Image: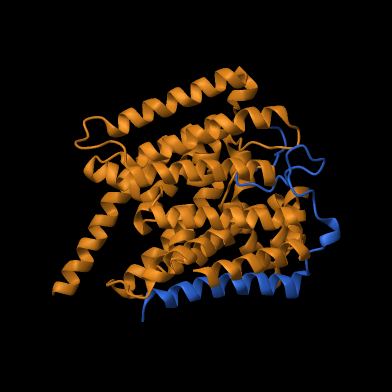
Chain colours: A orange, B blue
Amino acid sequence: MIVRIGLIAMCAAALAVTAGVRYALTACLGIAIGFTLERFGFGFAGPWRRLIRERQGQGVLAQCVAIGLTAIVIQPLIASSSSLLGAIAPISLTMILGAFVFGFAMQLILGCGSGTLVNAGSGNLIALVALPAFCVGSFLGTLILPAAMASTPHVAISLPETLGVPQSLLVTLLGLVALAWWATRGQGGDRWNRPLLIAALCIAALASLHVLIAGQPWGVVYGLGLWAAKMAMGLGWEPSAAAFWVHPINAQALSNSVLTDTTSLTDFGLIFGAALAAWKGAGKTPLTPMVRWWLYGAIVLAGLALGVSSRLAFGCNVGALFSGIASGSVHGWVWLVAAFVGSVGGVRVRDWLWQRVTQTEAA
Amino acid sequence: MTRRLGIAGAVLLVALIIASDWIFGGAPNPYRAPDPIAWGSSSGASGAICTFAPPTPGQ
């Protein structure tokens, strides 16, 4: 472990020298988040699945704690500093559809935005197959997004700007308390899971530090689309024809190094952090899960769907749900409802698919 | 084959992305680095974020 931490410290120092201290700190935050998610089993797709199938809401309760604590820190910070940016996005029909599809697809591969990266970092073959498709899908989503935005009205509502920070925080926290109560109502046993709550505290602290250091909340899918866009450029794609990529912010991200892109750095960090946490136990776990080859086709399709839908929905479970709600964006709440409804369908389809695999193997 | 092979594959994937971007897109410029912390800095957030919505005509 000491050798691995030393290697990561050397990489961070090299990044600080070659790109800048802020980028090195952002990557270290990503590593810490990835390590926490993998070590404590904190996630989004899995807890939603347990809530839908077994009515166990401990994971969702931990999510609410993490989002609520982050909101308490970042909403006043963002309102008081012009150099900080909240995760505020518009609500629209295409956004709702995107969130629904994302919720459905994330249950098929049991990996959301952060989950796919963490699972890939921990050596999960399904996530390793889904991740490149997720990147390509996210890039395709950037090509579709301008047409989607032109086709339906998009309305962004920021609670801190509309109500003021104290009222926005009150609404956000009341909403999270109501969600936590709904998720754990009628649940037998203890509602509080100690490791998940420790993880929630760590994630809240790291997500708040992310805003202070990077100036914007934690996100995942922007980086994935950027990597695929850079690959496409290498294959001859011309970004000047894409409305999304001609915007100065995106054009700059495209021309600059990935080592200076905030979401790319935290994404790399998630993979490295999960790898660090999983390495010891990974030596005893077989690489290939017992699944049929055609299931990998379904995984690629689900990865593509995750990418396209997360772009249309202005984020995944991290950028839209976690950071959106914590920033006071109403779109985060709409994303939550749409994605959960999609997840209910996704859980059923995943169970059906796995049942078919079992039957095929038994025959 | 254990999951350590998968971990190595994931780390290799990241290394490939960084290396190909460095070779074909250019190295980062440390002299254009922003302040270490965005809070209270004149060099704030990049704005390249998942919730980014490109402005469309008429909206």
- Quadrant where the C terminus of chain A is found in the figure: bottom left
Q: Residue at x 28, y 33 (%)?
A: A184
> Which residue is located at x 58 percent, y 19 percent?
A166
In this view, the residue in front, A103 or A327, is A327
Asked if B36 appears above or below A9 in the picture, the reply is above
Left or right relative to A132: residue B45: right
What is the x, y in percent for residue A69? 50, 33
Residue A176 coordinates in the image, percent (x, y) = 43, 29
Residue found farthest to the front? A2
Q: Hey, which quadrant is residue B28 in on the image?
A: bottom right
Instruction: Find residue A346 and report its horizontal and vertical position in percent.
Output: 33, 50
Compared to residue A341, the image places residue A360 above or below, namely below
Tell whether A362 sits left or right of A6.
Answer: left
* Residue B53 shown left or right of residue B44 in the figure: left
State the image coordinates of residue A301 (x, y, percent, origin top left).
42, 62
Q: Residue furthest bottom?
A: B1
Tally of marks: 0
Which quadrant of the figure has residue B27?
Answer: bottom right
Q: Nearer the viewer, residue A82 or A289?
A: A82
Evaluate whether residue A140 shows in this view. Answer: no
Task: Note whether residue A221 is visible.
Answer: yes
Q: Nearer the viewer, residue A207 or A127?
A: A207
In this rendering, the answer to whether A359 lies above or below A207 is below
Residue that protrudes farthest toward the right in the picture: B31
- At a point 44% along the width and 22% down the height, the residue shown is A174
